[in-house]
Image: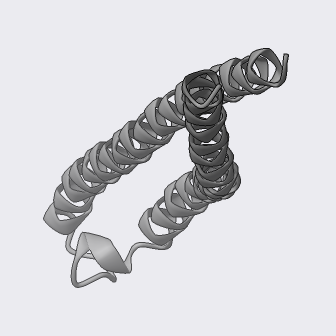
Amino acid sequence: MAIAGLNLNLLELTQRRSDLENDISYLQSQKNLSLYSQQDKQSLQYHEIADARRYYKEQFQILDADEDCKYESYEEMPEYKEMIDLISAKYQDELAEIEAWETQIDTQITTKSAELEEVKAWEESYRSMLQSNIQSDFNFGLNQ
């Protein structure tokens, strides 16, 4: 009967280990998704800034044709600076959200990994107990 109880506990631990491994795998895929999202946002920010730069370059060329232009380059135009600041702020907020999500995922992975190591240790302990009980039952029958 003790062997059956140990075997049942071992099976439960094996199931828990499998569940934890699946959870960790899912969390790692979510972390990859967050990394791709972060790269995507950075790419969008780069392109949006490039579009703004191109637009204000064109506006500066039109103003520069006018002899009363008070700016040396398009980068001195206040509208350009405001637009770049708005774009940067927008993407910084979005990137901060993604980083917070990534930190949360890292915390969950760490917690699940620690629990997995504990379950593996218990599983090994139950295997050892089960093996020694089977061995002692086998030896008991031989000694009679």
Q: Residue at x 36, y 44 (%)?
A: 48
**Vertical arrangement, residue 98 with respect to residue 61, above or below:** above
Q: Is residue 92 above or below residue 130?
A: below
Query: As rendered, which of 71 and 20 lies closer to the eye?
Result: 20
Q: Is residue 48 above or below residue 136?
A: below
Residue visible at 59% across and 31% down in the picture: 143
Would you say 28 lies left or right of 68 here?
A: right
Report which quarter residue 126 is drawn in: top right
Residue 85 position in % (x across, y down): 54, 67
In x, y percent, where is residue 86? 58, 58
Q: Residue at x 56, y 32 (%)?
A: 139
Residue 69 in view, yes or no: no
> Quadrant of residue 84 in the image?
bottom left
Decide if residue 28 is on the left or right side of residue 60. Answer: right
Answer yes or no: is residue 83 visible: yes
Number of dots carrying numbers: 0
Quadrant that contains the C terminus: top right
**x%, y% of residue 60?**
24, 62
Q: Is residue 69 left or right of residue 86?
A: left
Front residue (pair 11, 46): 11
Q: Quadrant of the N terminus?
A: top right
> Who's the residue at 53% across and 31% down the image?
21
Front-lying residue, 36 or 80: 36
In depth, the one of 55 and 120 nearer the eye is: 120
